[in-house]
Image (tube, rainbow, N blue to C red):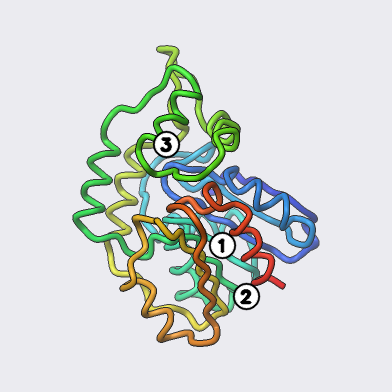
Amino acid sequence: MRLHLHEWGDPDWPSLVCLHGVTSYGGRFHRLADRLSTRFHVLAPDLRGHGLSEWEPPWTIETQLADVLETVAVDRGVWLGHSFGGRLVAELAARDPDRVERLVLLDPALQVPAHVAFDMAELERQEASFDSVEEAVQARYDSGRVLLAPRELLLEDEAAHLERGRDGRLRYRYCKSAVVASWSEMAVAPPAPARIPTLLVLGELSWLVLDDHIEPYRNALGDLLEIVYVPGGHTVFWDALGETTEALDRFLG
């Protein structure tokens, strides 16, 4: 299935493909793209079940990757993923390493413990709607998922991802069933790391990435691996936008 695609930069420049996490959408990468699109053609699809892409199942890793490859048609480039998107690009690198010149993992959900995946899937089944964008942003802070991001940044991003339903309330533009299925996929053991130059950007206070997930990359990649810790939590391009973009600039040369 062809996905809705966000693009920045000249199509003749080297490709940088960005895959978002669950409950998000490709447009969330716009601040990173604003900086990197001066030398890359940045492509960020809305994954199946998210944003303006179609929402029907199946919502497996295999189907998500097939959708992305059908949409972006990149023979070789830089692949970047945040959270579930990090798991997807790690899968791609393991299956088709010739397609991946460099790999960027932003606080990736390489594997989520089964009990955590269960709790997150159950939480996702609850109704979540808001009277205003301000209420949605405050809910982000109250949940502890956003720690340091400026309120103005979140207000802009959330306004673009919320839509008003027939009942007059705002909801995020994604399919809850797709997100529940994706939490199940993240509980499955990940592939072995591909021997590709890899940047890991990890939130110092993130709840997601465990040392057990990082150690296989250290052992397998050695000098091919760069690890950068940035302030804040899981959503590093919100809590630590400056530090994250600086790490990307250095890594991509």
Residue 146: x and y, percent? 44, 43
Q: Quadrant of the C terminus?
A: bottom right
Mark 3: secondary structure: helix
Q: Nearer the viewer, residue 197 or 152?
A: 152
Residue, disc 1: 80
Q: Is residue 29 above or below residue 211?
A: above
Asked if marks 3 and 2 touch (Cβ < 8 Å), the reply is no
Mark 3 vs mark 1: which is more N-terminal? 1
Mark 3 vs mark 2: which is more N-terminal? 2
Locate residue 80: give its quadrant.
Answer: bottom right
Q: Residues within 10 Å of mark 1 (few under 14, many from 20)?
A: many
Residue, disc 3: 141
Q: Please, what is the three-letter code of the amino acid marked with disc 1?
A: Leu
Q: Please, what is the three-letter code of the amino acid marked with disc 2?
A: Glu
Mark 2: secondary structure: strand
Asked if marks 2 and 1 touch (Cβ < 8 Å), the reply is no
Mark 2 vs mark 1: which is more N-terminal? 1
Residue 55: x and y, percent? 43, 39
Residue, disc 2: 101
Nearest to the eye among marks 3 and 2: give it.
3
